Structures are given as structure tokens and as C-alpha cells.
Image (tube, rainbow, N blue to C red):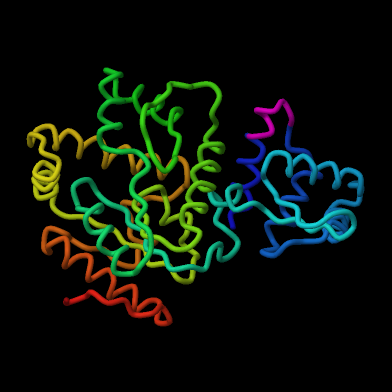
Amino acid sequence: MDVDRLISDTGQRLRVRGERMTPVRRAVLVCLAERPDAVRGTDIVADATASDPGLTAEGVAHALATFESMGVITRHGEGDAARYQLHPAACAGAGAPGPILDVPLVTIYEEYGAGAEAIGKRVARLLGVPFIGQSVSSETFEAAAQRDAVEANFFERFLRSFTPMPTDTDLVWDLASRTDHEIVSENTESLLWLAAEGAVIVGRNATKILHREPQALHVKLTGPVEARVAYASAKSGIPLDQARRRQEREDRVRADLARRLYRWDPTQSELFDLTINTASFTDAHAADLIVSAFRFAVADFPQAPGIGD
């Protein structure tokens, strides 16, 4: 886990509340970041005071209460038996300390027009898990861009209005009240809830959030730009020039959002287990490749019927 990132993000949230990152708060975060399992309050006090003899049990207790109220940590139990643990939404941007869900998962990052919806739905059917599509549609991106003549202004306004939920309708321009950390926390919490029993997930930074999951396969769908533009035009029933504008905007902005919010670069390959040029395959064949790769990667997942039928 990137402890410096965790401390920085939490400090940003504290500043929004008119508070600051104190030595005792920093010590509590470091202690919890080093422990993947829930930790007793007395152990946190011991660690914190050992690292800085000037800290007190009362200060640690106050820091724990503050972080619990912010949603940075979760508490299990009451009184002296209480144990504390970093909330997954708070530590996702810094790298989760261990498996979160341990259920069958396929994450898909798509370059525009690579067929993620059709391919992902078939993969979900073959594996017997739900399909979760992009949180923000191409149409919403397009409508947002049309409201702002200047693309740089569009990016900042879109980021501040980004609300990742199961369905996406209108964007509300709220520039002042949402920090990057709040956006990360809401998106992560929503994703973990949606994927709790397994899923095929397109976008939503799922590749980064779930990259430590033992039963996850992380896939990137790509292809030559002109092939992707032609595919999107045909699938969406829009002119080629409109599809081309969508491709240029979405490939750039989705990658920018990933770099800014989750500190990962989807244009690079290190987090992906499988990259497919979908221009070389039909949607069905690409889906079958993903399912086969998933079964190789997660040998104990039961074989589902359908491939080759």
C-alpha cells in the first residue's frame, strides 16, 4: 500500500472539514495500513506510542473516532473488544492491503468502440455472474462536452460532477463540494457493493480497485482506431464523424480520470492479464477467449456450459 498517498488523501479530506493531519492521526493511519486484518484499539495505542512517546491513548482514541466518522476506518465490536480496519473505499487509491471480495470477477477496460458491452454481456452469461456496464455513457460524455466549448473546462467540470452509480442520467455541475477523494470513495464503495457476489465489470476503474483479487481476470479491449470508430458507428447508429469525435474524447478523458483519481495508467499494460485486438475477432469469439483465459487463471471456478455450443 502507498501509505504516503493514504495520508495525503486523508489529509485532504480533513482540510475540507477544517481540520488537519496531526502526528497522532498519521501514526494511527500508518499502524492500520501495515495490518491487513482488524486491529484492537489497545494494539493501535501501543504501536502509536512506541513510534512517538509523546502521543497518548486519549489522542489515539480521538483519532479513531474522527476517522470512523469520516468513513476512513470501520469498527468491529464495542468497548475494549473493538477492532479497527481501514475501509476499502479509503485505501483503494493507495492500493488495498489484501483481497477484498474473493469472488469470480472479470474487469474490462475498453478503448472506445472495442465492443466491451456486447463482449462483456456474453462473458457474464457464460460465467453465470452479473454484467455491470460503464457508469458514464458515451451519450453523457457527449452531452457534457456540448455544454462547454473549452475542452479543458469540460474535463474539470465533468470530474466534479462525476457520480458513479448503477445508472447515470443527468450531470449536475457542482464544482466546489466534491474532492477527488470523495469521488474515489463513492466509486469504490459503489463498485464493491455491485460486485459483491461476482461480476463482469466494464470501466469504473475496476482493474485498479480489484487488481489484488485472487479470482479476478483483468482484460483490455483495443484495436485500430478506424476499426473501432466504424464498429461504434454501426452499433450506435451514428455518423462516422460523430463516432470519431467520441473516440478522441473518451479515450483521452477516461484515461485522464484513471490517472488523476486512482494513480494508474490504463494505456500501459502492467495491470492487465489479457489484451485483445477485437478487430481480429467477432464479439462472440472475443468473449470465448476471455472465458477460456479466466478458467486457466482461476482453475477452481466451475465450468459453465456454452462455449462452442
At x 77%, y 50%, the residue is 28
Total marks placed: 0
Where the N terminus falls, by quadrant?
bottom right
Vertical order, 293 against 195 (above or below): below
Q: Residue at x 20, y 40 (%)?
A: 247
- Where is residue 280, by image quadrant? bottom left
User: Compared to 268, does 289 lie above or below?
Assistant: below
Q: Where is residue 301? Give x, y as percent.
A: 41, 78
Q: From the top left corner, tell me how far across and down residue 166 is, in percent.
A: 42, 43
The x, y position of residue 101, in whole percent, is 53, 63
Where's the C terminus, which quadrant? bottom left
Residue nearest the viewer, comparing 199 with 219 = 199
Residue 107 horizontal side relative to residue 41, left or right: left
Nearer-the-camera pick, 269 or 309: 309
Within the image, what quadrant is residue 285 found in? bottom left
User: Can residue 148 be found in the magenta stretch?
Assistant: no
Residue 227: x %, y % from top left: 9, 50
Q: Give the range drawn in magenta.
A: 13-19
Q: Going 44% across and 40% down the picture, which residue do you hit?
A: 165
Q: Is residue 24 left or right of residue 272?
A: right
Instruction: Looking at the picture, tell me which residue is in the foreground, 45 or 282.
Output: 282
Left or right: 169, with 41 as reference point: left
Residue 54, compared with residue 183, is above or below; it is: below
